[in-house]
Image (cartoon, rainbow, N blue to C red):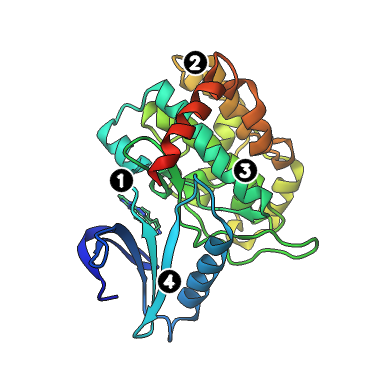
Amino acid sequence: MDKYQVLGLVGEGSYGVVTKCRNRENGQIVAVKKFLESDDDAAVRKIALREIKLLKQLRHENLVNLLDVCKRKKRWYLVFEFVDHTVLDDLEASPNGLDYSRVRKYLFQIMRGIAFCHSHNIIHRDIKPENILVSQSGVVKLCDFGFARPLATSGEVYTDYVATRWYRAPELLVGDSKYGRPVDVWAIGSLITEMLTGEPLFPGDSDIDQLFHITKCLGNLIPRQQELFYKNPLFAGMKLPEVKELESLEKRYPKLPAATLDLAKECLQIDPDKRPSCAELLQGDFFNKDGFAERISAWAQGTKMES
Ligand code: 38R
């Protein structure tokens, strides 16, 4: 790793650290993700190896590009292209939210990246503002597939799941082991209003509080989720809230354009089977009215030179 000169720290998490570096040989600026020592931590090693395998399979303009992988002194290092900033940085710079036109451009690219993952049977599982990178010219690149994993084959169930609570779909919160691509669509749905207002949609401070936020706005869980909730020992002795009067998205955000709220509501259906796929949403009105699709693909053609 001597060929990389560290310029600064850009992120830190349970996995290890991310630094901005310069390749001494060619001057290229990169982001190096250094995992915690992996020999004595099977979990970290598992995450690293899984991420490497996934990223090698997944190459797309809206996914961050993995340049190099190495292991030194029991540590894994992943070297990525460096992308200018994250959507979290954008939101910190604009606490009252981003412009509609910028949000539409971001959403289109987020959907494209996730549609590509889904077409390869990969669910991301941790879509949130800090995992959405944005280049100086506005190209979106999704990152952090540490939690991503290939879809279970039928009958197989998932066990090792934790993702950021605020973006978690109801099926995950109640502990449904049969979840799939719709969890990513839910996370995108909760990002829509957050990007436009700067305010997280459902900022729960515990799993049960998260369910309160969701049902207050969107209504009761479906029967399967209610059953799982009452069977889940994590919720022993707790009761699901019975919502009498909804505080709907329209009530909460009367000033947001109706088209945006419609898109958010489609993504945020309580029943995962009712949520449209990213591929379907890309074909929908939101991205195809007033010449947006043509404009953005012309723009994307122009930025391809960049990478
Ligand atoms: C930036 C810029 C500003 N903050 N990342 C994605 C890789 C990456 C990160 N490439 N370019 C950046 N650029 C690992 C940050 N913060 C940041 C973003 C994502 C910190 C941690 C993570 C999560 C993947 C991860 C570096 N992993």
* Disc nearer the start of the sequence (2/4): 4
- Residues packed near mark 2 inside 10 Å, few (<14), some (14 to 19) or many (20 plus): few
Q: Which dot, 1 or 2, sits closer to the camera?
A: 1
Measuring 59% from the left and 51% from the top, which residue is drawn there? 173
Residue 15, position as x, y percentages in the image: 40, 68
Query: Would you say the beta carbon of the disc 1 residue lies within 8 angstroms of ligand 1?
Result: yes
Distance of mark 2 from mark 3, alpha carbons?
25 Å
Q: Which residue is mark 2?
A: 257
- Residues packed near mark 4 inside 10 Å, few (<14), some (14 to 19) or many (20 plus): few
Q: Which residue is mark 4?
A: 69
Q: Amino acid at mark 4?
A: Val
- Left or right of 55 in this view: 115: right
Residue 84, disc: 1
Distance of mark 1 from mark 3, alpha carbons?
23 Å
SS class of the residue under badge 1? loop
Quadrant in which ligand 1 is drawn = bottom left
* Disc nearer the start of the sequence (2/3): 3
* Disc nearer the start of the sequence (1/2): 1
Q: Amino acid at mark 1?
A: Asp
Q: Amino acid at mark 2?
A: Pro
Q: Is residue 243 visible?
A: no
